[in-house]
């Protein structure tokens, strides 16, 4: 299976009437990333439908994903576009080949849904992040407790490409 490029994913979004944009900033060895999907509106600014925030270190396991949100009406396909663009960008612009994220534990039902969703993208649990002293740095980074998960970026792009 040939993996789609970031340019191809942007074209796919445009064909659906959506704007897909990446905001990338470099500060020393850290690259911050914000991926947004919006819908153009006549006479108004674009309507934000979804976004993902994260950062990358110049390491094979350096992609850290933080906030993923899809909101509003008619958001079918927004999530897959965001994930595909994120994975394609990482493969094209960084040495990162695996990503980490935290399936936050706000409440048990939502947490189970998040873990299931991230598993569908190819992420696997690494360990629980809780109240232990050794968890404090991770809690500060991600802002809470939950399950730390790691996923292969190539496999993630392969999986999500089927849903585009």
Image (cartoon, helix red, strand yellow):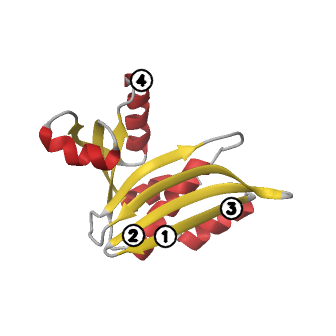
Q: Secondary structure at mark 2?
A: strand
Q: Residues within 10 Å of mark 1 (few under 14, many from 20)?
A: few
Which label sits on residue 19? Answer: 3
The residue that label 1 is drawn on is: 24
What whole-number distance in Å separates the C-alpha atoms at marks 2 and 3?
22 Å
Left/right placement of residue 146 relative to residue 17 reads left
Q: Which residue is mark 4?
A: 109
- How far is mark 1 from mark 2, CA to CA? 7 Å
Front: mark 2 or 4: 2
From the image, tell me which residue sits under label 2. 31
Are the residues flagged by discs 4 and 3 in contact, CB closer than 8 Å?
no
Q: Do labels 4 and 1 touch, CB within 8 Å? A: no
In the structure shown, which secondary structural element does the residue marked by tag 3 occupy? strand
Say whether marks 3 and 1 touch (CB < 8 Å).
Answer: no
Q: Eyeballing the image, is 123 above or below 157?
A: above
Cβ–Cβ below 8 Å for labels 1 and 2?
Answer: yes
Residue 41 position (above or below residue 95): above
| Disc number lying in front (2 or 3) | 2
């Amino acid at each position: 299976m040939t993996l789609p490029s970031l340019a191809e994913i942007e074209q796919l979004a445009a064909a659906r009437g959506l704007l897909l944009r990446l905001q990338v900033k470099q500060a020393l060895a850290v690259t911050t990333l914000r991926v947004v999907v919006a819908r153009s509106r006549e006479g108004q600014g674009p309507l934000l439908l979804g976004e993902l925030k994260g950062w990358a270190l110049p390491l094979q396991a350096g992609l850290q994903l933080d906030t993923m949100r899809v909101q509003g009406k008619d958001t079918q396909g927004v999530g897959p576009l965001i994930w595909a663009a994120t994975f394609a960008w990482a493969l094209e612009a960084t040495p990162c080949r695996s990503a980490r994220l935290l399936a936050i534990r706000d409440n048990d039902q939502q947490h189970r849904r998040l873990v299931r969703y991230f598993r569908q993208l190819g992420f696997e649990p690494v360990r629980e992040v809780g109240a232990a002293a050794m968890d404090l740095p991770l809690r500060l980074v991600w802002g809470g407790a939950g399950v730390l998960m790691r996923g292969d970026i190539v496999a993630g792009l392969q999986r999500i490409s089927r849903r585009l």
